[in-house]
Image (tube, rainbow, N blue to C red):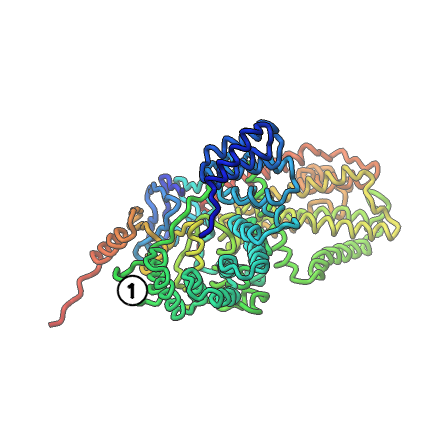
Amino acid sequence: MIILDRVHKAYRTIDGHQVVLQDVSAAIHPGRGLGILGANGAGKSTLIRLLAGTERPDAGRISRGSQAVSFPLGFGGTMHPKLSGLENVKFLARLYNAEEREAIAYVETFAELGTYFRMPVGTYSSGMRARLAFGACLAIQFDVYLIDEVTSVGDERFRVKCLDAFRQRMDRADVIMVTHDFETMRRYCDTGAVLRDGRLTLFDDLEAAIDDHARAMRDNLIPVMEFA
Amino acid sequence: MTDTPDYQALAAEAVAAAESLPYDVPALLHAAMMLLHARDIPAAKRFAYNALTLDRTDAPALRTLSGILDAAGERREAILIANELVKIAPTDAEVRLHLGAMLAAERRWQEALEHLSAHVVSTVATPLGWRLLSSVLHQSGHTVRAVEAARQATAADPNNIDYRLNLASLLSVRGLHDQALTEVQTALAQAPENALVWRVLSGVHTALGQLGQALEAAERAVELAGDDAGYRAHLGYVAGLCALPVASGEPSSWSLPTRQAREMRRATTLSDDIVTRGRVIYAIMLRDIRTRFGHTRLGYFWAIMEPITHLMTLGTIFYALNHGAPPVGDNLFLFYITGLVPFLMFSHVSHDVMSAAETNNVMLQLPIVKRTDIMVAHALRQFATELCVGIVIFSIAGLLGQRGVPADPLTALAAVTSIWLLAVGVGALNLVVVEMFPSYETIYAAMLRLMYVASGIYYSPIAMPDWVREVLVWNPILQGIEFFRSGFFRQYEPHWLDVPYLLTWVVATIGIGFALERSLRARMVVYT
């Protein structure tokens, strides 16, 4: 269980203070997939990074219990450009105490990088980078996978493969995801959370969360002028 | 099965025989087995227990009782008895299989792994043993070995559909979908009407992104399985991937995979934490060596050669300019070196620890990596490098007929360690300051150049006027260098050397540096 205890997080921006979380307390239960919804700029990615521990709250505590929570997946920012894909995977396996040989073998077949696997990550296209990151994350057994926009993974066929691989993991691990693609979210998540104005509302049913979010989004829409 | 023997009659016969021979273990066990076949489990249990009371260590009795308890659903008891039997007869491979299977059913993977591994290396290894081992390996996260075990099972019994499907799904889990496809197609040739084969085939096609074939196979599986909710759910899932309306009624009938209750990881303890930190620091060191020194061993060689040439050049220039007698020892060049080596160590280490602050450090995107891990890894890596440099330099001096080994190695080592720790502390302080004022980095570089002159590398404080010396001795780096020289040269004990003063600096900088780093960590986070 991930517990947020009176968590506060804000950014200083050019036009003042942007509050992402305002005194939020919540419990995310294991055994269920959680989809996080919110308008652009509401701070969904920040929330994912807070859950991962990449960022620390300004105040309050986030406790992950004894669960192994993954690094946030979705942007390829965790790979060293000078090292090859193989060396990056080796480093991650060492860090997270996974068996190096198995992790490398898994990523080599999963990411479909061919000879690029042994070349510096700096030479990769963004799609290849994302494939490497997904493969590396799947090669390590986490209890919770944090995914920020799966749709960033290149072509449709590989996206299906990724999603399928995550489904295979779901008997042993949970997924917390941010995506604009509600259909994808429905495949992984049965619960939802809406992030709006610094408040996080948890819903036991994803559909209720989507409804709530959609209603708020419609309310915010500026009425369109009608031309007769 | 059509001609089952009449177990009722056989059991009655065996019971009569056992009752006439109440102290005969084989007779009692035979009766127990017959009763088990006749489905009279309580009676079977009674007879097996009776046999065991006659001889607590009788292997067949233990085996029979464990089997009966397992059939009775008392698996934990059965495991205890089988464990006892393994202690008595550790070479009995059949018992290992029996025990391993029960442990696997209890989800006690580690123990199951041990017994099943013992079973499969024996001469009576069974395909079933390999099959169970494969699942246990998969459950404990060893997928590569799981595939190997699955291959063994299939090789030993090539006609078994379950073994082959197990192999195929494990290959698929490992991402080897092409090989998985070959296996499923073989299975399909063996059993074309088996719904499970079609179901696995559909899964493999899905993983390969071949949605059309996946859909076809899923439909065939549902057709063959009749009204099976799981198969229907899979069909719905594949149809959903194809963005097709599902033919079977509900618009989106695919469901989330069912979750098994999983074991929670045990809470982490302090010693786990220390192990994790050590692992992380080691991984960072290895990675740094790769990124800094390139992919060849020659890279690290140059990393050592660079300061060595620097030292040799500087030492030689000063040596050529100055022909006086050295303040200590009998060679001016050696005197310079004993100052330069510790000073460069201070300068490199303090700079490297500070560089853990680099805002583009991608490693900090990994929550398992703490900034202090990077600082410690940098400090340790640089310590090792500088130690190599020192050893090479002083060996060269030794080869040239000069003193190459410190007169008092322990003092010299203590001095090197204190300078290193001072550098780590100063580096930590620098890191905090540079986070707040990025321009500090150039200021620190200027300060280091000042220190280069003020640390007594090319002169001894003894040569200075009293008032200059009074000021210089407050410099902790000079204190460190003098400390090193006092250990290197025989009978060099300068009266201004104050080791407790140096150690106060060490403790203070490390304490304040790391405390500030910790308290300011929340603010120092990098945004991407």
Disc 1 target residue? B246
Depth order, front residue of A21/B44: B44
Depth order, front residue of B227/B314: B227
Residue A179: quarter of image: bottom left
Q: Chain of mark 1?
A: B
Q: How many marks?
A: 1
Are there few (<14), some (14-19), or many (20+) residues within 10 Å of tag 1?
Answer: some
Question: Which residue of the protein is positioned furthest toward the left in this rendering?
Answer: A228
Percent from the top left, x then y, of residue B193? 42, 64
Q: Residue at x 80, y 49 (%)?
A: B394
Q: Is residue A187 something one can see in this rendering? A: yes
Disc 1 marks a residue whose amino acid type is Val
State which quarter of the image contains the C terminus of chain A. Answer: bottom left
Percent from the top left, x then y, of residue B523? 45, 46
Q: Is residue A190 above or below residue B460?
A: below
Q: On the rendered structure, is B340 left or right of B402? A: left
Q: Residue at x 49, y 53 (%)?
A: B365
Percent from the top left, x then y, of residue B154? 56, 59
Percent from the top left, x then y, of residue B432? 52, 45
State which quarter of the image contains the N terminus of chain A. Answer: top left
Residue B428: quarter of image: top right
Q: Is residue B174 something one can see in this rendering? A: no
Q: On the rendered structure, is B306 left or right of B109? A: right
Question: Which residue of the protein is positioned furthest toward the bottom in this rendering?
Answer: A228
Depth order, front residue of B205/B80: B80
Q: Secondary structure at mark 1?
A: loop
